[in-house]
Structures are given as structure tokens and as C-alpha cells.
Image (tube, rainbow, N blue to C red):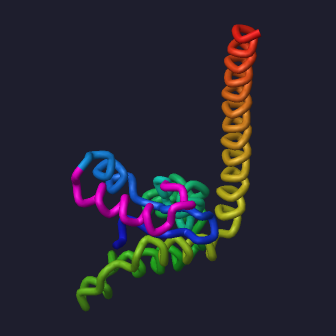
Amino acid sequence: MANIQINHKNNTIEMTKKFYNESCKYGTDEYKTLQEVRRDYPGYTPVVAKNKKSGEDMRDVFNGLNFEYMELYITKHDDKDNSIMAEFKMMRAEDDASKAVGAKSESYLVIRDWFLDKYPAVREFHEKRGKIVEDLRKKKEEAKKAKLEAAKKARRDKMLALIA
């Protein structure tokens, strides 16, 4: 089933958020499936799987790098023959030759990679900015984690003080 997977490396039963929400309702098919899997893997912990990071990092790094941005950038940095803009229009199937043969636009990823190959400075800028943003996110997450740990310790100390 695509909604639930066994991760032997981490000893977890991974499920989608939707599957988890349905498995919380007693008697549903999802509930029964989860109980069956838990019987088969008693030492494994059920968890909601996070989205895979495959393309997520690239989306964050190149946030804002859309076709409009590319076109404006090419307009400002094209050679005197406008050959790069002509290639861009052909890739987007917006030139006369493409329209004449009924060609369709290449995918965003193909055009993005072509654009970044033509303008490596844009790639370097976005990667540098992405690193700064990622460092900021990590710092914020660490601060949040430290705050939660401090609150947990305070609750534990308060409970110990009540017992003593």
C-alpha cells in the first residue's frame, strides 16, 4: 500500500498524514491496517512520513526563478544579436518556427537548467542566498528546540520540588 511503508533502517512504520488521520478513527480500514502492521512489527514506531527532500531543496534555493524573471534577466543581459532570447523563445515554443510546427514548451526544469547554464552568476547568487536562508532556518529551529528543552526541564524541576 502506498500510504504506509516499513522502514527497517529506522524501525518505523511510516504513513502519510491522510492515512494517519483516518487510522485514528476506530474501525476504519486504515485503523485495521495499522493495527495489523503493528502486530507484524511490534518494536517499530508508527510515524507520519515527512515529504522527501529530493526536489524540495532546489525549489527553496531557486525560489522566484520563474519564466518572467528569466525573460527579464535575458533582456538585460542578452548579446547584441539577441540570440539567447531567441533560444529562450524557442525553448518556450513562443517563436514563429515553433508555432509553425505546433511545438510545445519544454518543461520548467529543462528551461531552468538551460538558463542557469547560460548565466552561472544567477546560479551562484541563488545558491549563496539559499545557504544563508538555510543557516537562518537551522538557527531558528535550534533556538526553538532549546526553548522547549528549557520548559521541559522547568516542568521536571517543579514536579521534583513538589515530590520532595
Residue 6 lies, in percent from the top left, at: 49, 69
Residue 76 lies, in percent from the top left, at: 57, 60
Of residues 89 and 105, the one drawn nearer to the viewer in this rendering: 105
Residue 156 lies, in percent from the top left, at: 71, 20
Q: Is 37 inside the magenta-drawn segment?
A: yes
Overall secondary structure of the magenta stretch?
A: helix
Q: What residue occupies the far front of the structure in this picture? A: 164
Q: Is residue 72 visible?
A: no
In this rendering, the answer to whether 152 lies above or below 41 is above
Q: In the shown orientation, is residue 52 left or right of residue 39?
A: right
Could you tell me which residue is drawn at 40 percent across and 76 percent down? 107
Q: Quadrant of the C terminus?
A: top right
Of residues 74 and 15, the one drawn nearer to the viewer in this rendering: 15
Q: Start and end of the magenta stretch?
A: 27-46
Could you tell me which residue is drawn at 52 percent across and 58 percent down? 65
Q: Is residue 49 visible?
A: yes
Which quadrant would residue 106 be assigned to in this image? bottom left
Residue 16 lies, in percent from the top left, at: 39, 58
Q: In the shown orientation, is residue 135 left or right of residue 71?
A: right
Q: Is 131 inside the magenta-drawn segment?
A: no
Which quadrant would residue 8 be assigned to in this image? bottom right
